[in-house]
Image (cartoon, rainbow, N blue to C red):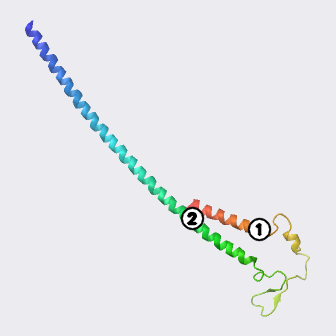
């Protein structure tokens, strides 16, 4: 019986060592795979962060250009509107010179008024005054620039 006990003890120790070696080797394999996956995920996160930063820079540059263009167009519109307010540029109660007609001019009043509404009738109502038209032009400019910005 002693012999059998020694053989069983040797088999048990051998089996225990085999399991321990397999466990520690499996633990190393799992750690290597985990490190590989972790490295891949970190690489993907870094690439995504770099791409997001590049997109943000591009969008910031696009926004800055759109603001600059809008401000320049707004200044040009304001200058044009200020020019239109000057009475010597747009005569109201004088005769209107017509290009190509020599020294003749077109009278400020019409002879036949059957088909033409009087000026007071045209300007009456909600759209009265130049402020309405100035604001409408500014709104139109703003909308067109916004559409241009979004479509690009």
| Point 73% across, 66% down: residue | 135
Residue 25 appears left or right of 81: left
Marks 1 and 2: which is nearer the front?
A: 1
Residue at point 73%, 68% (across, down): 134
Task: Answer with the quarter of the image where residue 4 lies.
Answer: top left
- Which residue occupies the extreme left position in the image? 3
On the image, numbered disc 1 is attached to which residue?
A: 131
Q: Quadrant of residue 111?
A: bottom right
Q: Nearer the viewer, residue 112 or 63?
A: 63
Counting labels gives 2
Q: How far from the left and from the top, in percent, is residue 119?
A: 87, 74
Residue 6 left/right relative to 141: left
The quarter of the rendered structure image containing the N terminus is top left
Residue at 10% across, 12% down: 6
Q: Nearer the viewer, residue 87 or 41?
A: 87
Secondary structure found at label 2: helix
Question: Could you tell me residue 3's position as x and y percent?
Answer: 7, 10
Asked if the residue under mark 2 is in contact with the one under mark 1, i.e. CB atoms within 8 Å, the reply is no
The Cα–Cα distance between marks 1 and 2, rounded to whole angstroms, is 26 Å
- Secondary structure at badge 1 equals helix
Query: Residue 129's x, y, as percent?
Result: 81, 69
| Horizontal side of residue 51 vs 87, given as left or right | left
State the residue at coordinates (86%, 67%): 124
- The residue pinned by badge 2 equals 66
């Amino acid at each position: 019986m002693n012999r059998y006990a020694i053989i069983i003890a040797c088999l048990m120790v051998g089996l225990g060592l085999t399991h321990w070696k397999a466990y520690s080797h499996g633990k190393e394999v799992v750690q290597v795979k985990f490190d590989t996956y972790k490295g891949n995920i970190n690489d993907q996160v870094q690439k995504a962060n770099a791409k997001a930063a590049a997109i943000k820079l591009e969008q910031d540059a696009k926004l800055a250009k759109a603001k600059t263009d809008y401000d320049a167009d707004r200044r040009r519109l304001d200058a044009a509107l200020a020019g239109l307010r000057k009475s010597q540029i747009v005569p109201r109660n004088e005769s209107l010179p017509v290009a190509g007609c020599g020294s003749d001019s077109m009278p400020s009043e019409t002879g036949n008024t059957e088909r033409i509404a009087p000026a007071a009738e045209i300007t009456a109502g909600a759209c009265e005054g130049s402020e309405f038209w100035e604001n409408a032009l500014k709104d139109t400019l703003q909308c067109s620039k916004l559409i241009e910005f979004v479509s690009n």
